[in-house]
Image (tube, grey):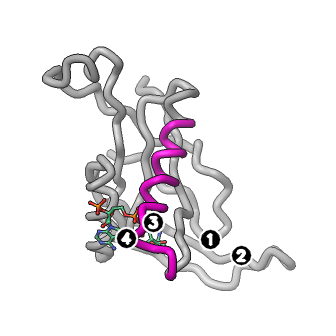
Amino acid sequence: MRPPHPWLYGLGVAPAARRHGIGRLLTAAAETQARLHGFPATSLDVDRDAVGLVAFYQRLGYERVGPHEHHWQTVDPATGRVTARGTSSTWIMRHTFPAPADEAHPTSGPEPEPEATGARPQDRRRAPPAPPT
Ligand SMILES: CC(C)(COP(=O)(O)OP(=O)(O)OC[C@H]1O[C@@H](n2cnc3c(N)ncnc32)[C@H](O)[C@@H]1OP(=O)(O)O)[C@@H](O)C(=O)NCCC(=O)NCCS
């Protein structure tokens, strides 16, 4: 079985504070926690038409794993009622961390691809994605 690993969700920087490195730092902080807990990678999904966002994550080391149809819903926290739902076409993207030996010898081949899991936090807006094929 391929190892589980965390799912990153809900990254956001206030519009006035963007493009100052905060998104990069927040992503790196989450990845540091994942590595400290022994996980081999972090994954997330991004709307396929969000070209700038895909570029942002690629700059941070993420690769597109494959397309995904992400079924989401909005829940009113006061009542628990679903107020909207829909489907977004996304890319699942993954940053696989180099093993320590690979960091010492960066020409080593990539790790076997792990599988995204339900490590994603409870998602009030969207249903969790199916694992990538
Ligand atoms: C995506 C987001 C978190 C980026 O935060 P940020 O603080 O502006 O990002 P950074 O300043 O750390 O940028 C890191 C790198 O990505 C690049 N980058 C950032 N936003 C980008 C964009 N929209 N298109 C292309 N490149 C981008 C930066 O230029 C920088 O590259 P560099 O270091 O080579 O110059 C922010 O734009 C945001 O909150 N967007 C709305 C919410 C959202 O879409 N979240 C993602 C959910 S999956």
Q: Quadrant of ligand 1?
A: bottom left
| Drawn side of residue 98 relative to residue 88, left or right | left
Asked if the residue under mark 1 is in contact with the one under mark 2, i.e. CB atoms within 8 Å, the reply is yes
Distance between the alpha carbons at the discs numbered 1 and 4: 14 Å
Earlier in the chain: of badge 3 and badge 4, it is 4
> In the rendered structure, does residue 129 fall within the stretch colored magenta?
no
Distance between the alpha carbons at the discs numbered 3 and 2: 16 Å
Q: Residues within 10 Å of mark 3 (few under 14, many from 20)?
A: many
Residue wearing tag 4 = 47
Q: Secondary structure at mark 2?
A: strand
Label 4 CB-ligand 1 distance < 8 A: yes
Magenta span of residues = 16-33
Residue wearing tag 3 = 70
Earlier in the chain: of badge 2 and badge 4, it is 4
Magenta segment main secondary structure = helix
Q: Identify whether 106 is placed above or below 70.
A: above
Residue type at numbered disc 1: Arg
Residue wearing tag 2 = 75
Distance between the alpha carbons at the discs numbered 2 and 1: 6 Å
* Location of residue 82 (image quadrant): bottom right
Residue type at numbered disc 4: Asp
Residue wearing tag 1 = 125
Asked if the residue under mark 4 is in contact with the one under mark 2, i.e. CB atoms within 8 Å, the reply is no
